[in-house]
Image (cartoon, rainbow, N blue to C red):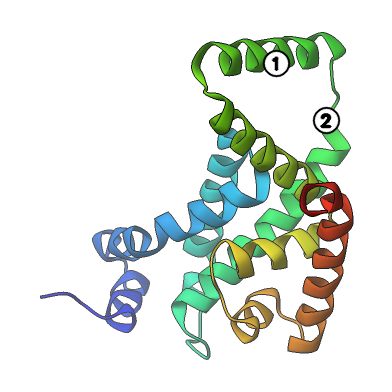
Amino acid sequence: MAHTDTELIEQSKAGNFSAFEQLIFRYDKDVLNIASRYTRSADDAKDIYQETFIRVFKGLPKFQQQSGFSTWIFRIATNVCLTHREKKKRTSHVSLDDENDDETTVAYAISDSKADSQMYGNEISSRIEDALQDLSPKQKLVFTLRHYQDYKLKDIAVMMNCAEGTVKKYLFEATQKMRMHLKDLYD
């Protein structure tokens, strides 16, 4: 018999690690999807995933169940995404050699294995991903949660701990920037 989130939370608070694992398994794919869409890097997504569940584990004793567990965990994931990007900005540096190697590798992979129509689709996907990277962290997060994860605006507002109007503003700004960045694709 499957336990409810509330039952698993109470068991986890009482020290039942198996119950905590069940909670993780219920939400791990969603957290990883959010992180993957936000970062475009499997390694960074895994770091965000891990940090999210560490924070969930540490914060679970204080969780009051005033919101749904899924809302709480996704709020943690969104906060980790935002702080991860800020940390990355402070510590990252780019090697021009690495960049050229990646471009060469990608160019060879595309020319060797993709048909023209598939290349065009990949180019569009790449352009969309590049446009996403030009958004502010909060705009990117709102756009990703809304369009890639299909969350409602009110749910995103709860996750980001802000007003629904603020979420609408971020989404509107993100959409405008995306349109400007991709204008040549649909003209």
* Residue 61 disc label: none
Q: Residue furthest bottom?
A: 66
**Residue sitting at x 47%, y 71%:** 60
Task: Tell me the quarter of the picture where residue 23 sits.
Answer: bottom left
For residue 86, above or below residue 176: above
Sequence order check, earlier mark of 2 and 1: 2
Few, some or many residues within 10 Å of mark 2 (<14, 14–19, 20+): few
Which residue is denoted by mark 2 in the rendering? 92
State the image coordinates of residue 92 (x, y, percent, origin top left): 83, 30
Q: Amino acid at mark 2?
A: Ser
Q: Residue furthest left?
A: 1
Q: Report how far apart the C-alphas of labels 2 and 1 lie in the structure.
A: 17 Å
Across and down, in percent, residue 99 comes to 79, 17
* Amino acid carrying mark 1 in the image: Asp
Q: Nearer the viewer, mark 2 or mark 1?
A: 1
Give residue 59's quadrant in the image.
bottom right
Residue beneath label 1, please?
A: 102
